[in-house]
Amino acid sequence: MKTYKILNNFGLKKSYSSKFLFTAFIGTHIPLIGLILFVLLFPEHQLDTFMSIVIVLLYTLLAAAGTLYILNQLLSPIRLATKTMQEFESSQTILEVPIAYTDEAGVLLSQINSTLVKIKTLTEERNNFVGLITHDLRNPLAATIGLSYLIKESSKEEEVLEYADLIHQSGQTGLKIISDIMSILKADDFSIDQSELETIEIKKFILKQIEAVNGINAGKKIEFLINVKDSDALKVHSNFFSHIIQNLLTNAIKFSHPNSKVEINGQHLIDNYKLEIIDSGIGFNQTDSEKIFEKFTSLKREGTQNEPTTGLGLFLTKMLVKKHKGEIFATSEGLNMGATFTIII
């Protein structure tokens, strides 16, 4: 940055390009300047053609070397900007950069610094907010789990005990989901490492997820038809993949009519595995197939029994599928014609 600073103090404060042009102008004229100086300083020497060529070539080489060096030094603000971005990306550290310069490079450094400070501040505020949400959501769920124990202790009726177990199971599942989702939201650069993947038996895994949403399904009694081979297996992050499946099952329950059926189909492709969850519920217009995955989508609707929705479920589902390097898409023949959600991993 020293050369850049010197040229900046030399009267070229306003324009980054003028520093380059000034350097290039001086560099290209050094041979001429050198020749003129030689003639002025040594008037008694008569220059022949050979000597003139030698002097011009010598000064040209010196000028080229000096010009290239200075121009390379002038790139130091750009290199510093690049290093600052790379350092922030790798460790969330903001390097100290000069922000007082007023040319284009100086403004760039100033804006990068300002933007990174804002990002870091927002990240810290988000993390604080996430901590608050975690605390506020855990308390009622923990209380619900505690009440399930009290219900089981105060009643011996089989049906009541069964519902108490569902309440307890749903509460525990909710706490686990909160824990995992909050860890995703807190992550500065969330990704799934290959070492975190494990092979699951898909049919058994889906049955376990259906069991986890029994509490949600208790009032609607949706029947799940699983068309997956017992031998089908897939390598996934089991916790996050359980969120994917549970979100899609919950979505199917929410938007299906009571006592209807939801079909789950699995199929090995050449290099991938395709999983479909098909319901016969309220469906959607196919033109909205991308919008339903948007965060806080304007297309969010209440379920068939007025179940509330946040507009976050499918957004988080798509994010987790993409973290598995997969894709998810939705199709429907229209309103009240059901919907099909397809995952390919």
Image (cartoon, rainbow, N blue to C red):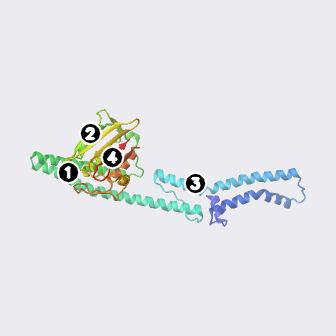
Disc 4 and disc 3: Cα gap in Å?
46 Å
Q: Which label belongs to residue 192?
A: none
Disc 2 and disc 3: Cα gap in Å?
57 Å
Q: Which label belongs to residue 145?
A: 1
Residue 308: % across, % down: 26, 57
Q: Name the residue under label 4.
A: 341
Q: Which residue is found at the position 9% from the left and 47% from the top?
A: 157
Disc 2 and disc 4: Cα gap in Å?
15 Å
Mark 4 touches mark 1? (CB < 8 Å): no
Give the residue type at disc 3.
Arg
- Label located before the other in sequence (4 or 3): 3
Q: What element carries label 3?
A: helix
Quadrant showing the C terminus: top left
Give the residue type at disc 2.
Ile
Mark 2 touches mark 4? (CB < 8 Å): no
Q: Which of 107 and 333 is in front in this view?
A: 333
Q: Is mark 1 on a helix, strand or loop?
A: helix
Q: What element carries label 2?
A: strand
User: Can you tell which of label 4 and label 3 is closer to the viewer?
Assistant: 4
Left or right, 13 with reference to 276: right
Give the residue type at disc 1.
Ile
Q: Name the residue under label 3.
A: 79
Q: Which of 6 and 274 is in front in this view?
A: 274
Residue 5: % across, % down: 63, 62
Q: Name the residue under label 2.
A: 226
Q: Which residue is found at the position 32% from the left and 34% from the top?
A: 232
